[in-house]
Image (cartoon, rainbow, N blue to C red):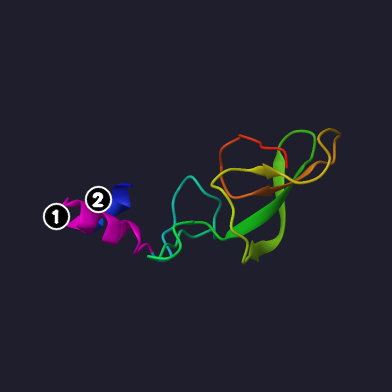
Amino acid sequence: MLEVLKQCKGDFSRDNVMKQAESLHDLELPIVLPGIKVNTTHTDHRPISSMQFVRWDGKSWVRFGDLVAGATVLGFVTLAGRSSGPSRTVIGTSRCNRLSAI
């Protein structure tokens, strides 16, 4: 939202805020994993379209593989696979620790 307000350059009318919110291109945010960029258009308001696989190693989540592009995801980690066990694999887009089972 901060980037949208910066792009408004003082014109905070509804039309301009919507125009700027629909014009985010390759925005990198500190809350998402490195390499994941935010993009919006007037026809697609879903800002994140790439993911990163991560694996629990017993102490922390460890990223592996390349970014997976082309999927529309929410801005938080999504559990993909078993709901318990030491080798959980998840698809991550965010640095936060929220999990959502699918």
Q: How crowded is mark 2: few (under 14 residues within 10 Å), some or many (20 or more)?
A: some
Tell me which residue sits at (59%, 50%) in the image.
93
Which of the 4 quarters of the picture holds residue 56? top right
Looking at the image, which is closer to me, 13 or 26?
Answer: 13
Tell me which residue sits at (54%, 55%) in the image.
34
Q: Is residue 85 left or right of residue 70?
A: right
Question: Is residue 84 depicted above or below 78 in this figure?
Answer: above
Q: Residues within 10 Å of mark 1 (few under 14, many from 20)?
A: few
- Mark 1 = which residue? 11
Q: Is residue 17 magenta?
A: yes
Estimate the x, y position of residue 62 in percent, counting from the top left.
71, 46
Label 2 sits on a secondary structure element that is: helix
Specify the segment rendered in magenta.
Answer: 8-24
Question: Is residue 83 depicted above or below 32 in this figure?
Answer: above
Q: What residue type is labelled 1?
A: Asp
- Mark 2 = which residue? 5
Tell me which residue sits at (83%, 33%) in the image.
84
Question: Is residue 94 depicted above or below 46 in this figure?
Answer: above
Q: Distance between the residues labelled 2 and 1?
A: 9 Å
Estimate the x, y position of residue 53 in percent, counting from the top left.
71, 53
